[in-house]
Image (cartoon, coloured by chain):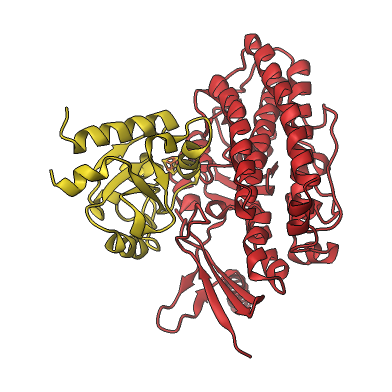
Amino acid sequence: MSLKLKALTKSIWVYHLSTGSCNNCDIEILDLLTPRFDVERFGIILVGSIRHADAILVTGALNLKTIPRVKAIYDQAPKPCVIIAIGACSCGQGIFAKGYNTPEPVDSLLPVNIYIPGCPPKPEAMILGIVKLIQKLRGKK
Amino acid sequence: MARNIIPIGPYHPLQEEPEFFRLHVDGETVVDMDIEIGYNHRAIEKISESKSYDQVTFLIERICGICSTSHPFAYTNAIDDLLGVQVPERALYIRTIIGELERIHSHLLWLGLAGHFLGYNTVWMWAWRYREPILDIFERISGNRNHYAMFKPGGVRRDLDEADFPWIKKTLKGLLPKFDMFKGAVMDDPVIRARTEGVGVLTKKDVHDYACVGPTARASGVAIDVRRDDPYAAYDRVDWKVITADGGGVFAKAVVRILELYESTNIVLQCLDKMPKGPIDLNIKDMPVGEGIGRHEAPRGEVFHYIMSDGGNSPARHKVRAPSYMNIFSNKKAVIGETVSDATIILAAVDPCYCCTERMAVVDCKTGKKLMDGQDLIRLSQEKTERLRNTRTIL
Ligand code: SF4
């Protein structure tokens, strides 16, 4: 475990990347920031630029139009960068697997570190996922 | 004239969905605008043709996460139209309740985002906090906070439990003072007024020209509402009124949405009182050959679904028209001539929902020319008819 990655677990700054979703996972992510869940308590904030991000929250099923953009954004991300796949769409391809516009799942393009399934996952599930991610990065069971 | 282009998107901190705006500005003033969408296109109409009628409700729910009931609502209306059946009374009431609860949560969501765009993050936090009780109600009814999967052709999937009614009523009534607070915060705040009143105005004529629907049209004084104009579900059995405002600017749109919060709460409370007991589902087994259309007044305006059946297990053709598809083009009218700083709130004021709207066009990459759009398809179709006609006469 690199020191950089370990340091990253202190307060994860996340960037939200919607790759062609139904919006619901995105709304639930924003919901995490609002008073009921308020993940800022744990040092998790949503940043506007990929260059400030420690982690990318990927939602949605990749489609032909977003694939090149997603690649470009991942290339700009400072490494190490943790990829969190949120929702059935980005974990597999969900209900859109057979569509003509959704050729490949997210993990064939990006190295996904943790999957949070659900359609949409509940905010509690997302928090649990991030807690598990931090434990994993710190090398705990 | 010196023109600069400000690109917004496709990934931009202001937006939660990918979309791309190109603002052409001259100094501070926006002189032209391009909209590029298509980042959310997921081939839903095509996938729908490979699902059974029952599965389609789950698929189209996932067109849009914010108004996830409006598509199944319009779709089930279309199926009922195709079958020519009368859905059980209790199911109609349940559908209405779900539809209106969704309007409340969607309008609160918009209000929050609009506050965020204007720099009023407090409004954002408040609005989203008071949206949570609505999601709790959904969770109690359906087991999920969003994507409730309540609708099915010929009825609804789950019944409401009478034992929950007092709690639901109490929660809703508890929200009314909060709505009052929003009304006060938006209508009486001089700064919000100054930022939004008379900004991004659409006149009545613009609304007609661009065929806007929903709150975007109602804010310009055009009283259209499918719930009243073509009643379905239980909307004609309860007492409510269509909210309109004059002015057509961002302020008017906010006022319409805030006042609709009260109407929707009112509708839900009445439905809970009046709901009869009885079956909730027709258990439809066969699908005849035919076609049906269904409409629903979604939080953003009229949703339209068309279903063609060839008697098989899945739709032969499924056509969806979402309200944002009509509304976002009015941005072009509303934004031009305004300053850059107002552009974002104007773009947000129609409450655009791009994941509902995505369409496909075939484009030749080399020339960038659209190979086919709606007009071309109509032309092709007309040419084909013409050809057939000619061959007939020859024969
Ligand atoms: S996983 Fe479900 S809720 Fe999330 S983007 Fe996909 S369809 Fe929407």
In this view, the residue farthest toward the left is A1
Residue at x 54%, y 78% (from the top left corner): B5
The answer to whether residue B58 is left or right of residue B259 is left
Picture coordinates of residue B337, whole percent (x, y): 72, 74
User: Which quadrant is the C terminus of chain A positioned in?
Assistant: top left
Regarding residue B342, the answer to whether it shows in the image is yes
Which shade of the palette goes to chain B? Answer: red
User: Can you see residue B87?
Assistant: no
Q: Residue shown at 44%/56% (left/top)?
A: A48
> In the picture provided, is B29 more to the left or to the right than B387?
right
Q: Position of residue A58 (x, y in %)?
A: 36, 48
**What is the residue that sits farthest to the top in this orientation?**
B163
Residue shown at 46% from the left, 74% from the top: B363
Image location of residue A92, percent across then percent down: 31, 43
**Colour used to depict chain A in the structure image:** yellow
When asked about the image quadrant of residue A136, the answer is: top left
> In the depicted view, which residue is nearer to us: B237 or B77?
B237
Front residue of B97 and B247 = B247
